[in-house]
Image: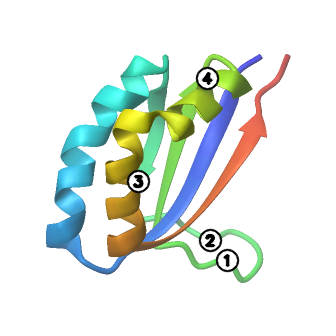
Amino acid sequence: MTAYLVLDLTVNDLRGFMPYVEAIPAFIAKHGGRYVSKGADPEVMEGDWTPQRVVILEFPSRDAAKGFLADPDAQDLFARRHRTTTSRLVLVDGEA
C-alpha cells in the first residue's frame, strides 16, 4: 500500500536550506519515493491552517517512507532542514 509524507514548512533561512533542496531528491529516489507536489503557494480552502509551502512525497509503502526518514546517510540533511525551517510532517497511508 502506498504511503505519503506530507510536509508543511516555513523556510527561515533560504541560503542554509538550499543544500537540503539540492541533495534530498537522491534520498527520496533511493527509497522508491517521488514528489507528488512541491507546492510553494498553497491555497487554504477550509480552516485556519496557513502553510507557506507543502511538499507531498509518495512512497511504495509505509516501511519505505520510514526507511527514508531513518536513512543514516540523510540525517545531516534532515538536521539542516530542522535548523533552517519550521516544519511539520505527517505520514498517511494511500488507498489499498
Q: CA distance from mark 4 to mark 3?
A: 17 Å
- Using residue 78 as the reference point, say whether residue 68 is left or right of it: right
User: Counting residues from the N terminus, which is met first, the one under dot 1 or under dot 3?
Assistant: 1
Q: Is residue 33 above or below residue 66?
A: above
The residue type indicated by label 3 comes to Phe
Q: Which residue is mark 1?
A: 49
Q: CA distance from mark 1 to mark 3?
A: 24 Å
Q: Which residue is mark 3?
A: 78
Q: CA distance from mark 2 to mark 4?
A: 29 Å
The residue type indicated by label 2 comes to Val
User: Counting residues from the N terminus, which is met first, the one under dot 4 or under dot 1?
Assistant: 1
x 38%, y 21%: residue = 29
- Using residue 68 as the reference point, say whether residue 29 is left or right of it: left
Assign a secondary structure to mark 4. Answer: helix
**Label 4 neighbourhood size at 10 Å, few (<14), some (14-19), many (20+)?**
some
User: Counting residues from the N terminus, which is met first, the one under dot 2 or under dot 1?
Assistant: 2
**Label 3 neighbourhood size at 10 Å, few (<14), some (14-19), many (20+)?**
some
The residue type indicated by label 4 comes to Ala
Q: Which residue is mark 4?
A: 64
Assign a secondary structure to mark 3. Answer: helix
Assign a secondary structure to mark 1. Answer: loop
Frontmost of labels 1 and 3 is 3
Indicate how the structure is coloured in the image.
rainbow
The front one of 83 and 89 is 83
Q: CA distance from mark 2 to mark 3?
A: 27 Å
User: Counting residues from the N terminus, which is met first, the one under dot 2 or under dot 3?
Assistant: 2
Frontmost of labels 2 and 1 is 1
Tags 2 and 3 touching, CB below 8 Å: no
Tags 2 and 1 touching, CB below 8 Å: yes
Quick check: can you spot residue 62? yes
Q: Which residue is mark 2?
A: 44
